[in-house]
Amino acid sequence: MPDGIRVTLLAIYSLILVFGGLVSTVTLVRILKSSCLSVTTTAVINLILVHYLFLLTVPFRIHYYASNEWSLGPTFCRLVSATLHGHMLLSFIFYVIILVIRDISFFKQTSRLAFYRRLHAVAFSVSIWLVIFSILLPVTFSSYGTNSNYGTNSNYSTNSNYSNNSTKCFQFGSAIKKGSVRDLNYVISCAILLTVLAFTGCQLYILIRVLQLHKMTAFKHQEFWAQVKSFLFILIMIVCFFPYHIFRIYYVINIHKYELEWKNEVFFAMTALSCFDMLIFFGKCRWATKMAFSCVDCCK
């Protein structure tokens, strides 16, 4: 692995571990102190749990990129690698759940969708995680990474500088050469890109409706800022997921180009920056409110 790529990955994952974990912890404590039983809050708690499960594996990535050596075996290497895939997909799924719930609340003009008892929220969460583990764990241990040669960069195995070395990890690019895996990558990337675009259009439509309804006083209404918060979730998906999936399609098409594998790793690492999504719940956007009021006063 080129030293520049290794240092970049080390910096990204260190930032995510320290600040992403701190932001998620503070947000979780705030939520647990409240007595809110809304479906959205439950989805947010589960989203934070997704971040925590991923963050548990980040120290192993940091150690690997710092030492440039993996000594924990191929099975654990595949598990740690699959966790990043799982984090991206599960985060995306919970973003979709949150946005759908908030959009339903807007169009049905309900204040919020809520569980009647905390036990219902727990049962809902447990059901989701049972489905997640029943799908992801068997796939991870039976299929993920088994088509690649552990410790070998099979895309470039003819080069003597990249000989078999069991101390290397996260090099599963050769699996994409399989037709079914390549097609699955196309489907997932295109589905995520189109879904984000659809939600972007829907959220812009909602914001326009709110602005038309309240006109110049829209910035003073809680409904407007609630929709801005929804748009921030979409913005996170655009910033964290869009670059990776656009590049992923290009990478899969040009899988024979060895140098793209390392660039793909950097784009993939950037999807984990979604761990900072809990910043949306910090404060009440007072700086934005003041800015909005200033703009309104200037337009009078």
Image: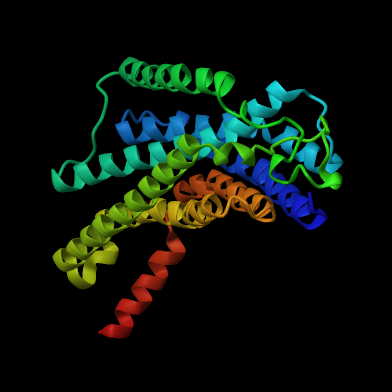
Residue 19 shows in the view: yes
The residue lying toward the viewer, choosing from 202 and 34, is: 202
Q: Position of residue 142 (x, y in %)?
A: 56, 18
Taking the image as shown, residue 7 lies to the left or right of residue 189, namely: right
Q: Image point 33% across, 36% down: which residue?
A: 40
204 is higher (above) or lower (below) than 274: below
Residue 15: percent from left, percent from top:
69, 48
In front of the other: 249 or 199: 249
User: What color scheme is it?
Assistant: rainbow
For the residue pair 180 and 64, the one nearer the viewer reads as 180
Q: Is residue 179 above or below residue 211?
A: above
Does 245 sit left or right of 157 as displayed?
Answer: left
Residue 185 coordinates in the image, percent (x, y): 47, 42
Q: Is residue 91 visible?
A: no
Could you tell me how many numbered marks the image carries?
A: 0
Q: Quadrant of the C terminus?
A: bottom left
The residue sitting at 51% across, 22% down in the picture is 139
**Is 289 drawn above or below residue 63 in the view shown?**
below
Residue at (31% x, 17% y) in the render? 120
> Where does residue 125 sit, x and y in percent of width and height?
39, 22
What's the residue at 21%, 66% (across, down)? 211
